[in-house]
Image: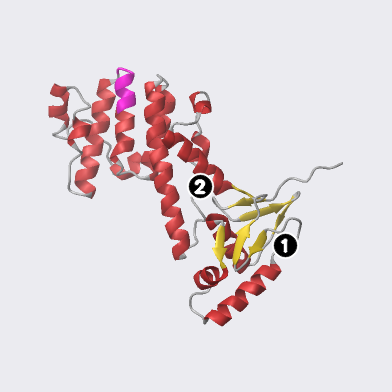
Amino acid sequence: MRLVSPPQLRLLGQFRLELGTGTVELCRNGQRLLAFMALRGRVSRTVLAGTLWPEVTEEHARGSLRTTLWKLPHGEPPLIGCCGDSLLVTPALHVDVHALQQTALDVVEDCGPSFRTRPPLKLLTGEDLLPGWDEDWVLLERERLRQLRLNALDMLAEALIRQGRTALGMEAAWAGVRAEPLRESAHRGIVSAHLAEGNVSEAVRHYNAFCRLLSKELGVAPSPRFARMLPERLAVRASLCGGDLPRGDGLRGWFR
């Protein structure tokens, strides 16, 4: 007897729905409906129709919702089920955002023992939620996931450095810097890794570069907490933002 794989929905990167052994093409409204439902889980018909079709009357929006639901692939179990006036996604649907969210939360809550041997760097450094989609509900969820990812990367970097796995800790910290070049906590992770390896000159050099970047972009200095990470006599020199800094494309390009 041939086993059928559960339905898979990809929202990180390009939208993709896989049923059985193939990819299913959906119309734009079908993609929007399934993506919204996958992110929210259970939604009333009124909220769903008003969110996806905000510029038409309620009657028209509900009609569009019924049409879009009818066009979704039919199977057992159905992708979208009914519970009174609410709609909900079948638990059988595997959504990549859910895996990312749970992994990031496990890192933040420090309840993933497997991370001690297999840090989830690949998942935490993947693609953004539905890039190119500019609807308000997508932008909100995209930023929420971005912040969750960044916090998880910060904590993962700290944990790996404490374990003596400084190379992996630095990779996690650099992933945070690439995602947000002005994020101080990610830069602190890189400096912490350098110091753990005894590379004081590299730590000071990175601090200097970040000092220049903040001054150029925001007109501010790093926090006192960051400066206190360096040996006292070096912190005084570093606060002057000296050192060998990159030229040409600028520091923002260097940190990327």
Residue kind at label 1, given as amino acid type: Pro
Which residue occupies 48% across, 50% down? Answer: 128
Q: Residues within 10 Å of mark 2 (few under 14, many from 20)?
A: few
The main secondary structure of the magenta stretch is helix
Q: Residues within 10 Å of mark 1 (few under 14, many from 20)?
A: some
- Residue positioned most to the right: 1
What span is in magenta? 192-198
Numbered mark located on residue 73 in the image? 1
Residue 29 image offset from top left, x and y in percent? 60, 68
Q: Compare marks 1 and 2 and give the one earlier in the sequence.
A: 1
Quarter of the C terminus within the rendering: top left
Looking at this view, is 188 or 55 the one in front? Answer: 55
Instruction: Name the residue carrying label 2.
Output: 127
Q: Is residue 155 left or right of residue 208?
A: right
Residue 92 image offset from top left, x and y in percent? 67, 49
- Cα distance in 3D space between marks 1 and 2: 26 Å
